[in-house]
Image (cartoon, helix red, strand yellow):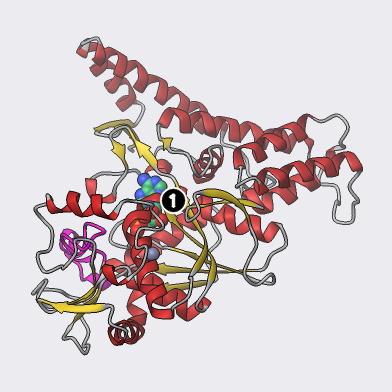
Amino acid sequence: MKLYNTLSKSIEDFKPIDENLVKMYTCGPTVYNYAHLGNLRTYIHEDILEKTLRYLGYNVKRVMNITDVGHLESDADEGEDKMLKGAKRENKTVWEIAQHYTDAFFRDIEKLNIKKADIVAKATDYINEYIEFIKGLEEKGYTYMANGNVYFDITKVEDYTKLSGMDLEQLKTASREEVSIDVHKKNPQDFVLWFTKSKFENQAMKWDSPWGVGYPGWHIECSVISLKNLGEQMDIHCGGVDHIPVHHTNEIAQTESYTGKPWVKYWWHSEFLIDQDGKMSKSKGEFLTLSLLEKKGFNPLSYRYYALNSHYRKQLAFSFDSLASAENAYMKLKSRIRSINDNADISEMELSKEAIKYKEEFKNCLEDDLNTANAITVLFNLLKADEVTNSEKIKLIEDFDKLLSLDLLKDEEVNEVHDEMAEYIEEMIQNRQEAKKNKNYQLADAIRAELLEKGIMLEDTRQGVNWKKIN
Ligand code: AMP
Ligand code: ZN
């Protein structure tokens, strides 16, 4: 398999350290709010990566953390604690917030047919291990104390920016101009390993430590959780591209300083899903969630189909129009498959040479740095192929779907009435937007009223117009 490696900035041949087991780590969600569609895009592609490895015959051990402590508003240790912010917003304890959004996250990924990691580790379950890790770094001279916090000194490591390729001198100059920078840091890129209560007097999550009562910095959890569960070296570490300059850079600095060994062989990053205003973010107020899509009548797997039709290393601009056309294509695909499926017993069937060619092509697309869009094209070509029998097609589709996980053979009735209704509503919304643009507010109001009469209420938001059924 060919895979792009952020560390070498090139496509490489994938060869695991131990040929019998691929060790894989994926940074998990910060559970202070729902996952947005951008986060879910990253988890869908990570799922494809894991399933491709399994499809190619590798054994995989995958670990994911749940960030329930330590992540401040900015990745570089500035601003408010994200968990505390969630708790204040909802008048709950931080522990309740963490539980609620962890459950919501697992419900979302289940709906998207994303396989759960083999090991899911809560950051707050590893406090003693963080303390041991920081003590180790302290003994080796990588840390300093200032204003009650323990910092990692980045000048002690060689090639701190090797992952991002950024120029450290330039970074330093740029950060000197930032007003919010922590004055206790010796270098602007130094980061906190352990905060004591001096940072937030009302910190709810805190533990005793040799440096005082406090809580761990954010980056430490991924280093320690992976060392504990995968050992000192691993094959693939995943996350979104936002993690390259700070989070993953800091993870590398502290882990390699601690073990004295190279840590991760392949760094894998997926590009952003963006909305009309640019970057999608959970802290921006209202944002796009899977439940919102469901409320609008979309099938969650249409979003998976939509995501798989773009490459993970390309930005994708979200719009409801493009999602609707993806849903349309996905529904047509499913009904085409239904029309050729006679539910014959295919378990013992041998594939012909012609059919095997499609299997090879499908595999080649995935081995080509996970080209899921091309893999889906192979599926469409297979459906059109005259030289392959329908039973063979179904057998291949069953095989492809182990990876694509689009429930291609699941025989649920597509709700045609619902589809027609949704299409009609979307059309009315378009007409109303058009009327508003032409300052024809009378027509716009009339359209709203007409929909309301049919039990559909419109809501204007910054992301566009939402609709919901009312009784
Ligand atoms: P978080 O819950 O913010 O820690 O992020 C969870 C995962 O989603 C991380 O791997 C992030 O890098 C990734 N991520 C954050 N924003 C986006 C986005 N707009 N598009 C794709 N992935 C994202
Ligand atoms: Zn991480």
The image quadrant that residue 139 belongs to is: bottom left
Toward the viewer: 266 or 240?
266
In the displayed structure, does residue 467 sit left or right of residue 388?
A: left
What is the secondary structure assignment of the residue under circle 1?
helix
Q: Give the range drawn in magenta.
A: 71-96
Residue 42 visible to the viewer? yes
Toward the viewer: 189 or 49?
189
**Horizontal and vertical percent position of residue 299:** 50, 42
Q: In this view, does 425 lie above or below 206?
A: above
**x 15%, y 59%: residue:** 79
**x 13%, y 53%: residue:** 176
Q: Is residue 130 above or below residue 284?
A: below
The image quadrant that residue 412 belongs to is: top right
Q: In which quadrant is the C terminus drawn?
A: top left
**x 51%, y 57%: residue:** 110
Q: In this view, does 149 lie above or below 85?
A: below
**Horizontal and vertical percent position of residue 351:** 89, 47
In the displayed structure, does residue 315 sit left or right of residue 186?
A: right
Q: Is residue 130 above or below residue 300?
A: below
Residue carrying label 1: 40
Q: Magenta segment: does it hold 92?
A: yes
Q: Identify which amino acid the numbered label 1 is placed on.
A: Leu
**x 60%, y 47%: residue:** 369
Q: Residue furthest bottom?
A: 210
Q: How many marks?
A: 1
In the displayed structure, does residue 115 sit left or right of residue 270?
A: right
